[in-house]
Every structure is written in C-alpha cells, then in structure tokens.
Amino acid sequence: MKQLNKVIFFIVALTNGVHLVFGDGDEKTMFRKNLDDEFEAIDNVKTTLDTALQTAIDENPGNKNLIAMQLDFKNNFHPVVTHLKELHRIYLMYCNVFDPIYAQYLKQVTDTNDKEKLKKFNNLAKQWEGKFRTNFMVTPFTITVKKKLLGLADPNAVFMVIMDEAIKSNTVKGNIKTWNSVKKVAKELDKSIQKHISSRDRPNEFAFLEDIYKVL
C-alpha cells in the first residue's frame, strides 16, 4: 500500500508541479539558491562582449584579426554559456519533481505542530538539497562562468587589449599566447560542463519519499 501511495502521489506531484512551484509565488521550495541573477549577469556580459566586437568590426571593415577574434569568441565562449544553461535546465526539471513532494510533506509536518518532526524534516530537506548541489554542480559552474566572462570584460584584460591591438595595429601578435590560453580554459570548462551533463546521476524521488517516511 505504501508503494502504491508513493506512485499515486508522484503522479499527482508531476501533474501539479508547475502550479506548486510557480503558482502563487508563496509556495515553499527546498532549494535555497536562485540563479536567475547570475544567469542574467552572464547574458548581459556576453552580449556586451559580442556587441563590442561587432561594433569594432563595423567600424573597421575588413579587419581580419577582429573577424577571427569574433569567431574565436563564438566558438569557444558561446558553447560554455549554452551548455551551462542546459545543465541548469536539467537541474530545474528535477527541482520541479522534488519541490511538490517537499511542499506536500512540509505542510503535513507543520500541521502536526510537532517541532521535533519539523526540525528533522527540514534537516532532511537540506541533506537532499546538498545531494542536488553535489550532483549537478550548477552553482559552482555558474559562478565560474560568470567570473570568467566578467574577467574578459575588464578593460585591462586580454579580450579588450587584443581587440584594441587589432584595431590600432591590425595585429594580435603581442597577446596571441595569452588569448590562446584563455580560449583553452574556455574549452576545458565547456568539456567539464558537458561531461557533467552526460554523467550525472538521476535524483531518486522515491528514495526521498522513503527518507521522509522515516522522519514521519
């Protein structure tokens, strides 16, 4: 009977998940870290760098170094952001499976007015959130990508320096080794994110329910 109840509740949770997580704005979530601001910052700085390059190309038609630099940026840095967003999408998909379960049983435990059970339940939720954070690594990846892109936007960083060099001298020889190193770091970061997307374990919502039953 317990297993049947778990299956029934899981189906209901999936059916109502979007409403429970996003419905009225005051539903509970077991995931404390919202990454919307970080992703907005990443998109903004990527757009800023894209725009700076395109403006330089428009103002210096035929500058092959600028065109090559634009291709480098698109080929090495754009995929990092794309794959990070894919990892985040998968992360949110599983959050939306677990959050309805969490919300349902948080209400159930709260309604009992049993402070000890509520404490145990909250500790359990934090443990499972920790498993999510370790499994997906979406927060550290996001922080790293944001930091790398913001670093490129620094006026004294190689991105701006090499772009200025290409405009003024029509060459990038003075900073090409540094630029190649930056591209290599981006490639390695992208590979790491992609590997994490393909190799991560699927969170087990039924194991979460089993742990909840032990607390209750």
Image: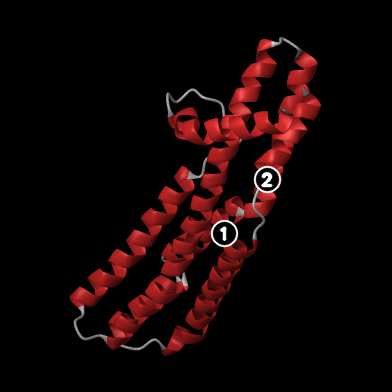
Which residue is at a point 19% across and 75% down the rendered structure image? 59
Q: What is the quadrant of residue 69 in the picture?
A: bottom left
Percent from the top left, x then y, of residue 141? 58, 57
Give 7 or 86, whichever is nearer the viewer. 7
- Residue at position x 72%, y 28% from top? 1
Image quadrant assignment for residue 47: bottom left
Distance between mark 1 and mark 2 Cα atoms: 28 Å
Identified at 51% across, 24% down, the residue is 27
Crowding near pointer 2: few (<14 within 10 Å), some, many (20+)?
few
At 39% from the left and 86% from the top, the residue drawn is 172
**Disc 1 versus disc 2: nearer the observer:** 2
What amino acid type should be assigned to the residue bearing mark 1?
Answer: Thr
Label 2 amino acid? Asn
Residue 9 % position (x, y): 60, 30
How far across and down, in percent of the image, does residue 76 sit?
45, 74
**Comes first in the chain, label 1 or label 2:** 1
Q: Quadrant of the C terminus?
A: top right
User: Can you see residue 124?
Assistant: no
Residue matched to label 1: 144
Per the image, label 1 sits on a secondary structure element best described as: helix
Does residue 23 lie above or below 173 as drawn?
above
Residue 63, image x, y percentages: 25, 85
* Mark 1 burial class by Cα count in 10 Å: few <14, some 14-19, many 20+: few
